[in-house]
Every structure is written in structure tokens, then in C-alpha cells.
Image (tube, grey):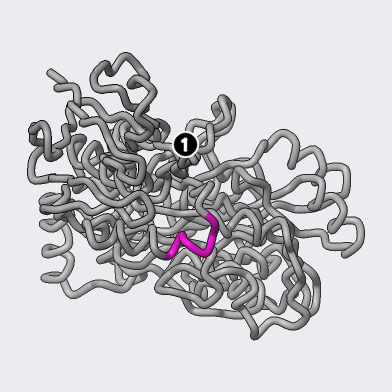
């Protein structure tokens, strides 16, 4: 049961600071039904069950203690604040049955996907067949990484050297890397405040660039209005390549992410929804794209050993005129992924439970803006993004650092220089003529990002929400007005 804080009458230049609450001015009463001494309680964030210790009354909240300080000084907090001890990069163990399959595969020595006997299906081939069925696609190719899948998707689509490829400006470095590797030239499109590609800017740049390809990144799992973007692409004859690294298992109006464009690419890197360390999957319903992609992946003339491919006629057209870019998936990774695929729908539900807990906790915090998701979007909450508002972007690094000292790892996309996996479009300086995208830079200047690994339980998520709320409240104390 919550204990109401007992606050003393304060002198004109003194303030009690408590978790974002400030008591001041001798002539007012406490607000929000917190009755007590004649002082105004200016509330920036009420959290039930947290108490204050002051010189004239005592109550405790764990190890937190606060004392009177001068109004012009920083609040003084004594004691150890709540801290999170978990790891934001620790994934769940590979399932035991997958480990057994991997060990059996290693004992066989037949790790290469084409090392099979007559009538035998390799693990990689079985993964392709099973993933195509799960995704609802006709064809599937297992390859070495999601970035590699993006590269050969563009080449299999027929991209020519020097052709322009539209792409949302907020994405990760493998996307422009794949465009560059395929010989294309990225044309970056602004994003909106909800981290989606800006459809108005997309239409404008599609017309001015003449590009016939959009590499659409569902960055951090945020799916744009697929009806609207598909309508524009149909009007202008633009083929969509979906980068679904963060949306494996997500849906838009009941349709799986990846089933809107000509071709889609998925990642099985450790921090994605399936984990083989590295790995990628390419899906399409186009037999010509599928045949070219299989040959490009390094099938030699063994393409018939793939599990979800078009008929012989499609390969007869391309097998001698298509280069080998050698990027196959091996049987070891495929064996690990097959087991995980059978658990994916359950894991999506587990991620979303954790996401909703964090979302609820952060929505109550002053200075944190968690964007509402589209009602048509069935997302996978393996990470959460939010805007930090009202404190100035110059103070966000301090906010991130304070969260880090309390065990909460947050990435800020406003930083100019790349940090770990985080980078902005204007840092990819191997590209010529990088544009000025003021809207994107403004959105990213307040954008923070946090992983939600399944090693976190529901109470972990509640604690993380409390810590972030607590830290942001340190920046939100209202100004003190002195009477003459």
C-alpha cells in the first residue's frame, strides 16, 4: 500500500526533490489529493509506493534517501538507486533438441549443404521448404546472411550498375552496403516521426530519380502503411524488395511482412527472431528471381537439391548466364534454425508481452514519447523505440549514460559518429553526394532504441521501465519561482 509523502514547510530558497516531485512556496497545498503541510507539490511523475525522507518526517523506499537542498542547486540523492543487472545482449540458449541435431550433424562431417546421398534431403533444403510453408511463399533460399540476401535480391531482380535504388534513410549499414555491392546507387527517402518511410517524400523522389526499385526496411519492426506504399509503387512501376530483418513473423492487415514485394529478405543473426549467429533467408513468388538467386548463391549445377525452388524451365533460362556469388547456408546452421522455427510463433507472443509491459511503463513518464502502433500492424516486440522530448537533444547523451550506470542499455540514433551497430545515413561516406535530410535528422535527434531479449522476464521489464522513468524525471524538475 502506498505511503503518502510527508513534506515539511519549506523556506523561500529551499526545495525537497523527490523522484521528480518538487515542494515549494509556503502558501499552497499539495496537489493530487496529497494533503499535508502548506506547500505546492509540482508533480512530474507519480509512481505508487515510493517514499521520501526529509529532516522533519521519515519514510523509506528501498535504499533511496533524499534531503533538503538549495533551490538553485542540483537535487542531492543519497543511497543506491534501483539498478538492473541483466544483459541486453544475452539471448536464450539454443534449444536442447537443436543442440542435439547440431552435434549429430558435426559427427557426420557433412556440413556442406550439397553433401547428400541419393534421395536424401539436406538440413538446408528442409529449412527452405519449411520456411517457405511458414512464410506463405512459393520459393525460399537459405544463404549466409541477411545482408547477403539483400545483395542477391537486387541482382536477381535485374538491377544494372549505376541504377538508383530508393531506400528509407533510417536503416542499418547492411542495406546501403547491399545496394552498393549490387552496383546500385542509394536514393535516401525521409522518414516520419513514427519511423516509417515518408510516403510524400517517397513519391517525390521516385519521380525525380526515375528509380524502379524500393528497398523498404521495416526498421526496428515498424511497418509503414503497406496499402499506401504499394499503391504508389504500382502507379510508378516500382518493385519492392522488403528488408524484413526486424519483422519476421509480423503482419500488416493479416498478411505476413515479406509478402508484399517482389522479393523479401530475412536475417538469422543472433539478435533477430531466429538465431544461428549469422544467416539469411530470401523468399519470392517469382520463379525467375528464385532461379537466379539460387544460382547466384553458389548452387553450381546442384540447384535441384534446394527445397523450395521453381521448375527446371526457370533454371534452364539462367543457369549458364548467371554468376556464382557463393553465399550458401551450411547444414549446421540450418539444423539449428529448423528447431527454432517451430517455436517462433510462441516466442512472438512472449516478446509482445514484454513489449507491452515496457510500453505501459514508459507511457506514464514525462519526457518519454512511445509512438502508438498502427491498428493494422501485428508487430513483433523484440525491441522498443521512443522519443526523448523536452530536455534538448544535447542532454540525451547524459540521459543515456545515466541509464547505463543503472544497468539499462539504450542506443541513441542522434549521435553523428557510428557506435557499435548504430549509425546514421550521413556517416556512410563511401557513398557520393549524401543528401541533407532535415526531417530524418530531426526525428533521429530524439530517437532512442532498446533491445528486449527473451532472457528478460516480465518483472525485469517492469524494473527497466521504472529506471528509465526515474532517470528522465531527473531532467524534468520544474523551475522554482521565487517571490520578491
Q: Classify mark 1: residues with Cα within 10 Å, few (<14), some (14-19) or many (20+).
A: many
Residue 132 % position (x, y): 47, 45
State which quadrant residue 436 falls in. Answer: bottom right
Q: Which residue is mark 1?
A: 379
Residue 392 % position (x, y): 54, 56
Q: Please say whether residue 131 is visible from this viewpoint.
A: yes
Magenta stretch, residue numbers: 392-397
Please, what secondary structure does the residue beneath circle 1 have?
Answer: loop
Q: Is residue 395 magenta?
A: yes
Residue 309 % position (x, y): 53, 54
Residue 50 % position (x, y): 18, 32
- What residue is shown at x 56% (from left), y 25% (from top)? 375
- The secondary structure that most of the magenta stretch takes on is helix
Q: Nearer the viewer, residue 342 or 43?
A: 43
Work out which quarter of the rendered image holds the N terminus and state it.
top left
**Up/down of 450 relative to 421, above or below:** above
Q: Is residue 117 magenta?
A: no
Amino acid at each position: 500500500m502506498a505511503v503518502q509523502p510527508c513534506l515539511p514547510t519549506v523556506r523561500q530558497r529551499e526545495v525537497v526533490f523527490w523522484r521528480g516531485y518538487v515542494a515549494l512556496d509556503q502558501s499552497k497545498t499539495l496537489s493530487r489529493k496529497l494533503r499535508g503541510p502548506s506547500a505546492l507539490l509540482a508533480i512530474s511523475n507519480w509512481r505508487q509506493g515510493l517514499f521520501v525522507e526529509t529532516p522533519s518526517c521519515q519514510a523509506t523506499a528501498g535504499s533511496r534517501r533524499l534531503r533538503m537542498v538549495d533551490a538553485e542547486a542540483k537535487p542531492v540523492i543519497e543511497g543506491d538507486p534501483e539498478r538492473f543487472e541483466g544483459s541486453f545482449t544475452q539471448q536464450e540458449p539454443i534449444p536442447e533438441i537443436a543442440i542435439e541435431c547440431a552435434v549429430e550433424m558435426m559427427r557426420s562431417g557433412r556440413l556442406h549443404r550439397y553433401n547428400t546421398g541419393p534421395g536424401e534431403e539436406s538440413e538446408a533444403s528442409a529449412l527452405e521448404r519449411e520456411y517457405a510453408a511458414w512464410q506463405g511463399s512459393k520459393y525460399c533460399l537459405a544463404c549466409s546472411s541477411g545482408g547477403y540476401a539483400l545483395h542477391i535480391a537486387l541482382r536477381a531482380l535485374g538491377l544494372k550498375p549505376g541504377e538508383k535504388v530508393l531506400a528509407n534513410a533510417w536503416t542499418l549499414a547492411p542495406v546501403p552496403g547491399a545496394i552498393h555491392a549490387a552496383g546500385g546507387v542509394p536514393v535516401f527517402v525521409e522518414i516520419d516521426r513514427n519511423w516509417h518511410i515518408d510516403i510524400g517524400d517517397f513519391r517525390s523522389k521516385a519521380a525525380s530519380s526515375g528509380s524502379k526499385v524500393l528497398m523498404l526496411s521495416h526498421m526496428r519492426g515498424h511497418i509503414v502503411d503497406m496499402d499506401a506504399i504499394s499503391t504508389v509503387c504500382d502507379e510508378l512501376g516500382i518493385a519492392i524488395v522488403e528488408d524484413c530483418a526486424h519483422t519476421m513473423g509480423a503482419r500488416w492487415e493479416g498478411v505476413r511482412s515479406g509478402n508484399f514485394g517482389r522479393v523479401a529478405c530475412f536475417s538469422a543473426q543472433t539478435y533477430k527472431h531466429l538465431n544461428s549467429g549469422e544467416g539469411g533467408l530470401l523468399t519470392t513468388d517469382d520463379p525467375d528471381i528464385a532461379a537466379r538467386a539460387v544460382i547466384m548463391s553458389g548452387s553450381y549445377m546442384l540447384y535441384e537439391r534446394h527445397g523450395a525452388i521453381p521448375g527446371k524451365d526457370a533454371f534452364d533460362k539462367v543457369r549458364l548466364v548467371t554468376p556464382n556469388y557463393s553465399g550458401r547456408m551450411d547444414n549446421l546452421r540450418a539444423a539449428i534454425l529448423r528447431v527454432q522455427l517451430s517455436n517462433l510463433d510462441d516466442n512472438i507472443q512472449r516478446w509482445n508481452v514484454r513489449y507491452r509491459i515496457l510500453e505501459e511503463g514508459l507511457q506514464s513518464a514525462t519526457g518519454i514519447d512511445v509512438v502508438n502502433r498502427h491498428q493494422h500492424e501485428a508487430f513483433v516486440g523484440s525491441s522498443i523505440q521512443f522519443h526523448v522530448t523536452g530536455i534538448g537533444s544535447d542532454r540525451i547523451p547524459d540521459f543515456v549514460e545515466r541509464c547505463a550506470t543503472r544497468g539499462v542499455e539504450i542506443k541513441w540514433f542522434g549521435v553523428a559518429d557510428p557506435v557499435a551497430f548504430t549509425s546514421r545515413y550521413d556517416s556512410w561516406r563511401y557513398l557520393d553526394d549524401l543528401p541533407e535530410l532535415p526531417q530524418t535528422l530531426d526525428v533521429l535527434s530524439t530517437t532512442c532504441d532498446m533491445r528486449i531479449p527473451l532472457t528478460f522476464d516480465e518483472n525485469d521489464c517492469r524494473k527497466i521501465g521504472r529506471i528509465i522513468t526515474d532517470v528522465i524525471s531527473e531532467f524534468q524538475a520544474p523551475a522554482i519561482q521565487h517571490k520578491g
